[in-house]
Image (cartoon, coloured by chain):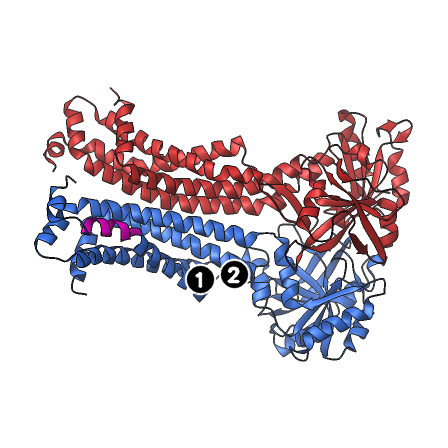
Amino acid sequence: MALPLKYNFRNITVRKSSTLATAFTIGLTVGVYLMVMALAHGIDLTLASSGEPLNLIVLREGSTAELNSSVSRENLNNLIYLDGVERESDQPLAAPETLTLIYKARKGMSQGSNVTIRGIGPMSNKLRSGYKTVAGRMFQPGLNEAVVSKRIAERFQGLDIGDKFRIQATDYSVVGLFEAGGKAFESEIWVDVNSLANATKRDTFSSVLLRVKDPSVLGPLAKRISDDQRLHLKAVPERTFYEDQQGAASGVLKVLAVFIAFIMAVGAGFAGMNTMYAAVARRTKEIGTLRVLGFSRRSILISFVLESVAIAIIGVGIGILLSLPLNFVSTGTANFTNFSEIAFNFRVTPDLMLSALIFGAGIGFLGSLLPSIRASRFKIVDALRAS
Amino acid sequence: MKFSKLIIKNILRNKRRTLLTISSLVVSLFLIITLATILTEFTRGSEKSNPLRLVTRHAVSLGFTLPMAQQQRIATVPGVKAVIPFSWFGGIYKDEKNFFANFAVDATRLRDVMTEVDMSDAEWQSFINDRQGAIVGKKLVQLYGFTNGQRVTLRSPIYDRSVEFIVRGVYTGGDEKTLFFHHEYVNELVPAWAKDQVSTFSILANSAADVPRISQAVDSLFINTDAPTKTESERDFAISFETMMGGVKQFMYGIMAAITFSLLLVMANTMAMTVRERTREVGMLKALGFQRGTIARLFVGEALVVTTLGALIGIGGAMVIFKSIDLSLYIPNFQSFMPTPQTLLLAFIVSISVGIASVIYSAYRVSGMTIAEALRSTE
């Protein structure tokens, strides 16, 4: 026969401060875990959402990022007329793009970070979804104008509408701010690809984006480009390209999250054991009485384990509540693939909360095992005789 | 103290509880020390920079290169003792996982500018004499087993080239996970766009007073050229990298605060249980004539002994662990992984403060009870 849960509930509420202290310890552990993981998750989700399913990105063979890639104009012409490249009113849906970096100071600081400047072609926006001008206007092709991601304009000095920035000898004017649904290119500055080529005196592109006709062409076309010995290029589905960047940016954070959470969990587990041992000691006589009433050793064991897990779950609740406001926090860090700022939101997602719940309940479970076993092993006479 | 024996007896009364509490303290302090050490390493570039050194990069960003010819003109700036190219090669050794920094430099003057790099004269000579030569830090030797005379191939995705070097020396000091080689040599192998280009120059000033002047003078030399420069002290250059990571410092402080707070909760909970269980004893002590202050001090003393023990084991444990495993080998850009004396002191102060704060309320409450109240307690 199992002990009624009401018994545990009463016990939890009668020692409020002790329960709360233990729950808070677990809550802080879970909260820290959630905070670091939400950061890693924010980066991952930003990158995961950035590639279009039907896009191929073409880079120089052997390059690891757009920044150290180059595609010649001659190769561009070879690429856009390949079979399988989608067309719109006879124009191939292909976008040569050029990437460079500009170092900008963060707002309120003397130093900052690199911001990606992307030179985009007339087709670029047809190959990407989510772009929206939210202030000012789009740049005019051929002019030295730029549109800046709103997030970047908010985080860095001198990138608002009306501001100018200089690349080599060319001054660009910011004429608009844009949003892009939280995708990676929402951390960029966009200018006309030809004007950027002039400004940087480069006659090659960084990458070429291709839209394929249908999903079945994606793999074969990528292989055909990568295998062509004359091109010295590699083509990767855009999705894969961004997903592959996840590890470099968020891997360290995940390791840190697990490391910190594990050690904090050990500390919280010890504290939980203390609380449970005290509870067992205080209720020794009670346990004797319960045994006399016919409750088995097992039901006493289960009862104490449940009580501890319940306290831990309260803790998880506290931890989740502490971390939820993070969903509204936008932040940024260096993306090592392109060595530049990636702006994103902390993301406390349901699956993250679920992992926190399992983790927290696990602490409660493991912490309660020894005290509960002790409680279940009392001899009835000894227990009843306890003071 | 007169009552130290009583305090010890009390601590030993519930050995399991004391052990669990101390264990909890130890792991938390270990974590605080680890995080503080990460933070120290993270800001090492700016904190431990050479005040006589400056770095020149392209004014727009490191994404642009500077013409090698600028070196001669920088050398003429008053106050400049030496200037060398210091060019990021981004070479990968076998696999991308084996990340370490590698720079193209002027081998003949590297030791003049990078004064912390220490190597025997014979090795310096053999490095300088071999155009294909390279020198490696001691930690790279530990990691990859490089030896003098070994051929090492680095593939650079930036320059799209694989270049073979011959190890001519092993240095200590500074970042011991770096490989240096001749700029001259690689310059012949890189693609046309990268010929006679460098990513940065490293400058050594005659005196600290010259540094701001040099910075301005160098930048004004090139302001209207195709390659305008930004010259800053090594410290500022390091900070420019540290700020790239965003709010890492605040983030780490936040985590450390959370750990400290949870430590306080653990300790306060333990002490509250201890005090509560001894309420009747307090009544007894009072009946025997013990003053309120003495009783409160007994509890505070008990908490302090526990936290001090926890602090000593935590600090000692961290020292032993970090002395036996050098984590810096496996973390890019980390030069060492030893807690600083300040970090250890911080950990000690944290645990002592937690010890006092955890017991103040319980001790105050129980010692203020009347004899009758305390004796009537049902705990």
Chain part drawn in magenta: B358-367
The residue depicted at 13 percent of the width and 30 percent of the height is A380
For disc 2, the neighbor class at 10 Å (few under 14, some 14 to 19, many from 20) is many
Residue B175 higher or lower than A378, as above or below? below
Q: Colour of chain A?
A: red
* Residue B242 occupies quadrant: bottom right
Element carrying mark 1 = helix
Residue B147's x, y, as percent?
61, 65
Question: Horizontal and vertical percent for residue B376?
Answer: 11, 41
Look at mark 1 in the image and give the residue it sits on: B343
- Classify mark 1: residues with Cα within 10 Å, few (<14), some (14-19) or many (20+): some
Residue B332: horizontal and vertical position, in percent?
59, 56
Total number of numbered labels?
2
Specify whether B286 is left or right of A115: left
| Residue under the point 84% across and 35% down | A123
Q: Earlier in the sequence, mark 1 or mark 2?
A: 2
Question: Which residue extends farthest top?
Answer: A1
**Contact between labelled residues 2 and 1, with CB atoms less than 8 Å apart:** yes
Q: Identify the residue at image location x=32%, y=44%.
A: A271
State the mark number for residue B40: 2
Q: Is residue B377 above or below residue A313?
A: below
Q: Which chain is blue?
A: B
The answer to which of A183 and A259 lies nearer the viewer is A183
Q: Secondary structure at mark 2?
A: helix
Q: Quadrant of the N terminus of chain B?
A: bottom left
